Image: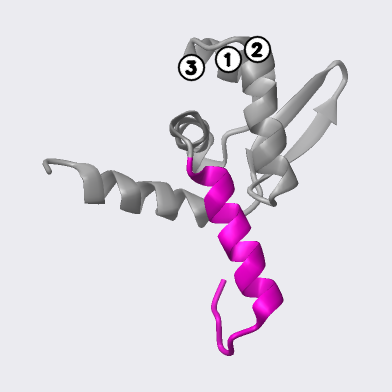
Amino acid sequence: MQFKELDADRLDTAANMLKAIAHPMRIAILKHLEGGKKLTVTQIHELLGIEQSTTSHHLGILKDKGVLCSRREGKNTFYYLKHDVLSQVVDCLERCTCGE
């Protein structure tokens, strides 16, 4: 998202997205969804080793703030990054925290 002018609504949306991402488990979720991956709550909770209800809570926050989307297929709901470019935010954080 580019800010050609200081649009208060867009800045507020961007800030809310960053707030939603600003949690260790949510960053980990985004990391697992990089590269266009689509995962279910069960798959994510198994990858992270946390309770399924906790995973659902984090996914709900990320979806509510426009970071993730979901798609239902049969009995499963798959979660994925709403914008693939969001993985660059995680990559940037990874580079900024490595070796310091």
What is the quadrant of residue 83 in the picture? bottom right
Q: Which residue is mark 1?
A: 45
Q: Which residue shows up at 71% across the image and 74% down it?
A: 9
Q: Which residue shows up at 12% across the image and 43% down it?
A: 100
- In the foreground, 87 or 38: 87
Numbered tag placed on residue 77 in the rendering: none
Residue 52 on image: x %, y %: 65, 12
For the stretch drawn in magenta, what is the main secondary structure?
helix
Q: Which residue shows up at 64% across the image and 67% down it?
A: 12
Secondary structure under tag 2 reads helix
Q: Which amino acid, mark 3?
A: Leu
Q: Residues within 10 Å of mark 1 (few under 14, many from 20)?
A: some
Magenta segment includes 10: yes
Magenta segment includes 98: no
Q: Which residue is mark 3?
A: 48
Secondary structure under tag 3 reads helix
Q: Which residue is mark 2?
A: 52
Q: CA distance from mark 3 to mark 1?
A: 5 Å
Numbered range of the magenta stretch: 1-22
Residue 2 on image: x %, y %: 54, 78
